[in-house]
Image (cartoon, rainbow, N blue to C red):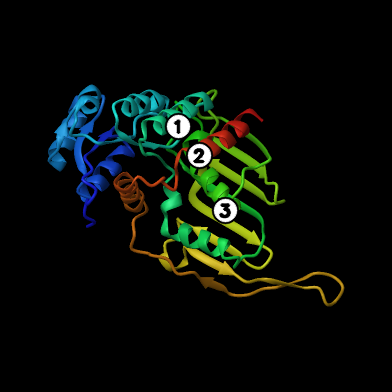
Amino acid sequence: MAVNGSGASVAVIGCGHWGKNLVRNFSELGALSAVVDYDAATAEKFAKMYGVDALTLDQALASTAITEVVIAAPAEQHAQIALAAIAAGKNVYVEKPVALNMDDATQIAEAAQKAGCVLMVGHLLRYHPAFEALLAAVRKGELGDIQYAYSNRVSTGIFRVEENALWSLAPHDFSLMLALFDEAPNHVEGTGAGWVTPGIEDEYRVNMTFPSGGRAHIFASWLHPFKEQRLVVVGDKAMAVFEDTHPDKEQKLRLYRHGIDRSAGKPVPVKADAEALPYDMDAEPLAQECQHFLDCCASGASPRTNADEALAVLGAMIAAKTA
């Protein structure tokens, strides 16, 4: 167990489907002091489970003992709670997306900068050890120039009624793509369709192009026969696959050094066996993310998924939605 050397005192706002995981991780890191949920019985349940206080939102924000607020409330509440937390002088971790529109997101970013508060957004897969290893390989030039990448994030359910598959599933993939290409896209287009709930897209497809000439494709769906979380990156020297749903941890991250033989006057593929790329297989991504937040609060450093990154991701998502 990591030790909370930052002196952080965290209140988690929202103990639902994802919030309960944040509660557990901050407790294991020794930083959890309180939980908040609109349902008082739920808050009391988790408070008793982890030996912390169950507070209302107003109580948590007014408490001088609470130094950090972690927001896992519904996305439409992110902006209101984040702005209130920043105004109360708290460091803020907000789950993805940071907000539902650029005006709110910009207001949050500017408020945090003015107040000198740490602002971090929960783009979880940026903290996955396998993706960290993949990104390091890309930046070292092991794959060469990235020509294209695609990401599939599909499963059967959970069906949402308050947001579509783009907003529920794809923020992670936008974050990964922007990190891989290390630049903002110059063109984004997206399209989706819905069948389960009128007006809510069950599947969404996004295409992006980048100034460097690279392309990215994202497919997100909760109306799919099986679960798959796969990122493929194709460079001019090698190709890589990050398959988070692979049952064998050693096969989650693989490198393919395929080549092309042009000696006969036409291109012929020269296939190579897959190589497993090493990464820390024992580290839990969410624990890594939560520890990073605590470390940034202690040092004042800017988080990996900071306001700038959050605004870039949100901007690309909005472009996909309105294309």
Q: Is residue 160 at least partly visible in the picture?
A: no
In primary-sequence order, the first of circles 2 and 3 is 3
In the rendered image, residue 76, in percent from the top left (x then y), is placed at 42, 25
What residue appears at the point 25 percent right and 45 percent down from the top-left corner? Answer: 26
Q: Is residue 182 above or below residue 186?
A: below
Q: Residues within 10 Å of mark 1 (few under 14, many from 20)?
A: many
Q: Are marks 1 and 3 in contact (CB under 8 Å)?
A: no
Q: How crowded is the residue under tag 3: few (<14 C-alpha within 10 Å), some, or many (20+)?
A: some
Q: Which mark is residue 180?
A: 3
Badge 1 amino acid? Ala
Q: Position of residue 37 (x, y in %)?
A: 25, 28
Query: Which residue type carries mark 3?
Result: Leu
In the rendered image, the quadrant that contains the C terminus is: top right
Q: In the rendered image, which residue does mark 1 sit on?
A: 109
Which amino acid type is shown beneath numbered disc 2? Asp
Say which quarter of the image contains residue 239. bottom right
Front disc: 2 or 3: 2
Q: Residue at x 60, y 58 (%)?
A: 233
Residue at the far right in the pictured view: 265
Give percent across and percent down for residue 272: 63, 75
Q: CA distance from mark 2 to mark 3?
A: 16 Å
Q: Is residue 168 left or right of residue 209?
A: left
Q: Secondary structure at mark 3?
A: helix
> In the picture, residue 274 is in which quadrant?
bottom right
Instruction: Say if mark 1 contacts mark 2, CB within 8 Å.
Output: yes
Q: Against 135, is 45 above or below? A: above
Image location (x, y in percent) of residue 82: 36, 28
- Left or right, 101 with reference to 71: right
| Residue 302: assigned label | none
- To which residue does mark 2 refer? 308
Disc 1/disc 3 C-alpha distance (Å): 23 Å
